Amino acid sequence: MKKFHLSAFTLAALLFFTVSCAGTKPLATSASMNAPLEITVIHINDHHSHLEPVQLDMMIGGKKTAALFGGYPEVVHEIKMLKQSAKNPITLHAGDAITGTLYFTLFGGSADAAMMNISGFDYFTLGNHEFDAGNEGLKKFLDYLKVPVLSANVNPDKSSILYGMWKPYAVMEVEGQKIGIIGLDTVRKTVDSSSPGKDVRFVDEIEASQKYADELKKQGINKIILLSHGGALKNFEIAEKVAGIDIIITGDTHWLFGNEAMKKAGLPVVTDQTYGTADYPKKFMSPANEPVYVVEGWEYSKFVGELRIQFNAAGIVTSIEGKPHVLVHDTWFERRDSANKKYTPTGAEKDAIISELKQLPFVSIARADENAAAVLEQFKKEKETLGSEVVGSISGSVMPGGTKNRIPNADNPRGSVATRFVAETMLSEMRSLGTGNIDFTIQNSGGVRADIVPGAVTFNDAYTFLPFGNTLFLVDVTGAEAKQIVEDAMEFALAGTSTGAFPYGAGIRFEANREKDGNGKRLVKLEIQNRKTGAWELVDETKMYRMGTNAYIAGEKDGYVTLGKVVQERGGEDTYLPDAESFIKFLKKNPDFMAYTDSNVVLHF
């Protein structure tokens, strides 16, 4: 494998087009240190190596319509356009630039760095996924990156290879006034679900935020931005508990902050049980009774945020205008007709869709920056070549998967052995990361799209088996809830709603009947494997287990109602680690893997 391989042509393109705009500061004037000031903050977060457009649905003209969203060259174009009309622009990236697609798997961060270097970012803060390839992987990414990096609560030892590669904060000078920008990372997820070295120390988010806000205030700086990968809820807490911060640009939780018009268009603007709708921006009051505004910019290169902010001489925000920019292409659309068949609108219907899009104030028609597109094209070509490289091999029998094998049946009583294999790769990856002593994983069979056959397995094969980009999700469930989760999934699959809901797992096995008993149950027996002894044990309904799954069904999709309710009530953790990536890593660790012969499921007909 050539994880960090770059051809001479791609490297030349990278060096030619990588133009660093980072750290550019407006020239100082003779303005007073304490005077009113207007700035514009332009921001993104969590692009996660998603460099090409993705297909999503939204409501356009009252009809559900699929369109293409985003793309990194499109992000670059949008940032450049916004900066042309912005007053004193400051451009920020709130972390998690890497991990998530084949671009990272193959290029180890160099593709992302190349795109970021031509984006005009002033500063970037570390996210938890920056540590997914350990200290060495992060250093390689930062060696390519020309954007200054900030992180106040991630402190490498002097002996670490990462020592000195970032600062806790920076001070920008705008119209003769100073603006402090503090970087911050999420602590628990980085330590528990990524791979930082033992020579990297982490400090509590609130403690670090207050420490450096105080330090900046001692320097006479009264306008402070927190560039935080702490997640929306943690940053809401910081806004209410830390004095001195004015603006918080967050990442990590992938929340789309927005408004009712965006909700009406079918976009996933978040509403939290405690805090309500995530307005863009969301206002809080600090312990000093001063306004603090928090925003997050969705995910995967689909969104660019714009905040126009006015400070008074005391450094208080007196006016703020938020403009979310969702990047939607006007080149291709898809709808369903009255017979529920897909079709591509053309002519007057397509023109009407485009006209509607242009009228939506939160939509920016996506256009690719030419230089960024040229850089990406070289990586795309090399991705096509490297994607055919072998990551491992499987020997033994075919592991059935795909549509016809989703549910055990008379012709194939084992069901989707391929889904069990995917669940096993998820369990292996999560345990290797030390994610909270995980006990078992559950995977829906609809997420595995084909048989897994003996022979060599390539990068492209992994993304063919698992094409949806689902990410690994952690949640704590009781034994009773685990049983009901399986019941829910079987009901959804066997009652004819969606066969793809049928559950398979690793570290868990069960026996069930196709038909319900007198109590409305199918489950006969459910066992969980003791992670310490390896012994299979009947589930303890009162015991709390740590379960791994994918974020799709954790969101109550495919009939996983109980699982969705548990996540809503008690929370869970999306690791944002792609299932295809865990599949690849498993095969690298087991390069000559012997195929499973059963699925850990017995279904009586």
Image (cartoon, helix red, strand yellow):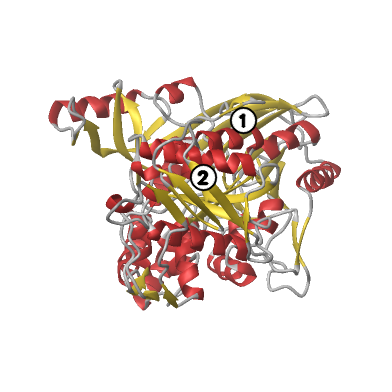
Out of 173 and 280, give the one closest to the viewer: 280
Is residue 196 in view from this perspective? yes
User: 558 left or right of 358?
Assistant: right
Q: Indicate the quadrant containing the N terminus: top left, top right, bottom left or bottom right.
A: bottom left
Q: Where is residue 446 shown, x and y percent of the image?
A: 37, 48
Is residue 114 in view from this perspective? no
- Residue occupying image coordinates x 37% and y 71%: 10
- Residue occupying image coordinates x 71% and y 26%: 284
Disc 1: CA contacts within 10 A as few (<14), some (14-19) or many (>=20): some
Amino acid residing under circle 2: Val
Out of 293 and 101, give the one closest to the viewer: 101
User: 45 left or right of 559?
Assistant: right
Please identify, in this view, whether the residue under mark 2 or under mark 1 is nearer the observer.
Answer: 2
Q: Is residue 485 above or below residue 116?
A: above
Q: Where is residue 475 shown, x and y percent of the image?
A: 61, 45
Q: Which mark is residue 309?
A: 1
Q: Secondary structure at mark 1?
A: strand
- Residue occupying image coordinates x 66% and y 49%: 545
Q: Secondary structure at mark 2?
A: strand
Residue farthest front in this picture: 518
Disc 2: CA contacts within 10 A as few (<14), some (14-19) or many (>=20): some
User: 147 left or right of 30?
Assistant: left
Q: Which mark is residue 69?
A: none
- Residue occupying image coordinates x 79% and y 36%: 244
Do the residues under discs 2 and 1 have CB atoms within 8 angstroms? no
Q: Where is residue 412 shown, x and y percent of the image?
A: 31, 57
Q: Which mark is residue 524?
A: 2
Rendering quarter of residue 64 = top left
Rendering quarter of residue 56 = top left
Amino acid residing under circle 1: Ile
Rendering quarter of residue 161 = bottom right
Q: Earlier in the sequence, mark 2 or mark 1?
A: 1
